[in-house]
Image: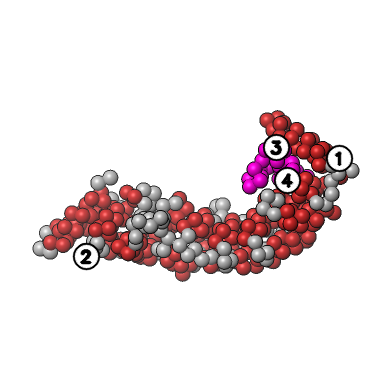
Amino acid sequence: AFRLAVLDRLLDDPGLQGKDAENREGILKGISAIGPLTTESAELITAVAKCVHISEHDLPGQAGRLTHAIVRASPEHSEALVRSLIRFGGSGWPLIRPALLAAHDRQPELAEGLLLELTKTSEDDLRVVALEAMQWIVIRDRDPQRLIEAARVLGKDRSPIVRRAVPQVLARLRERAPAEALQILVDIEWENDPLLGETVLDALHPQYGLDPDSLADTDVDTLLRRLARIHSIESYHVLQFVAFASTRRPDQTVQMLLDRIEQTKHRDRRSDERWTPLPYNGHGLSLPGVAAAEHRDDLLRRIRDAVIGASSGERFWIPELFAVAAPDLDTGFALLGEWSQSTDDTKVSGAACLLRGFGH
């Protein structure tokens, strides 16, 4: 009866019709080849995955749909199935998420308990699997507080790959617990991991994630300080945050960018992670808050004045920042004009250096 229920479910699955007919046939053959189904369903699912030529390390929707169908067809086996997938090892772990989601449809308390158990395992990859399931379960749960607390703990996890999976859970809490989610997000340490920084900032979105306008000024400052330490700020979500931060904290944003440029003279150019303080030619970098600030000219003078005594590496990047920060050529030229008649040779040569930023 269990086998027939699974087959009926698969036969009716629109995702396995049409262009996926070959995969559907492969799944049916795989089921037939295994023999009677038992609670050790991990072996079945892995064999089916191999039957349809699915990599053990990249199991796509067909195997996931089969897992979901098995759990829904026989919910009394859901706990045994999840535990057998855990024991089976790495090739079975990607199927834990669909098993937990299907179990949550029928037995939410059981699914949540299994999920919380996974968040405490010693295996980094299993904690990531738990978070991948959590991002869907947290929006279904009647009371997500236990899951929120688990996300808070994992946000401080020793493993960067685990911390990278937390922001997507937090983004799902934009309506249910936005204040708590924002605080957990800000508390995630990036160290010098740009990918982790990008995933944190990706969770900030006024419509689809956590609203950055709800960040306290001190939280914006914290994120800016972390941006000062990663080797590159060229990714889309990082640049979007820098543009936003300039509207809230223009002084701190300018100082963060100058600090990045200043670090150029201390960085080893031969390093595998080459230090790139700004995007080349300022591509994608926008500072609307600087242009709109009441003390705009003072901010631009701070950038301009940094060229005095700067190293050759710094003198490459400061003109790029000055050109991005100046709202138009007239404003930039006016500030450089303050130096053009100077008797100080360093200011005259500095103005000439800064003009290079407007050449592209």
Depth check, mark 2 against mark 3: the one in front is 3
Disc 1/disc 3 C-alpha distance (Å) = 20 Å
- Residue 309: image tag: 2
Residue at (21% x, 64% y) in the render: 308
Mark closer to the chain start, 1 or 3? 1
Residue at (26% x, 51% y) in the render: 357
- Residue 48 lies in magenta, yes or no? yes
Q: How crowded is mark 3: few (under 14 residues within 10 Å), some or many (20 or more)?
A: some
Q: Can residue 22 be seen in this view?
A: yes
**Mark 3 is on which residue type?**
Val
Colour pattern of the rendering: secondary structure
Q: Along the line of sight, which residue is nearer the eye, 6 or 199?
A: 6
In this figure, which residue is indicated by the disc labeled 1? 4
Mark closer to the chain start, 4 or 1? 1
- Dot 2 falls on a residue whose secondary structure is loop
Disc 4/disc 1 C-alpha distance (Å) = 19 Å
- Dot 1 falls on a residue whose secondary structure is helix
Residue at (51% x, 66% y) in the render: 189
The C terminus sits in image quarter:
top left
Instruction: Tell me if label 4 and label 1 are in contact, CB under 8 Å.
Output: no
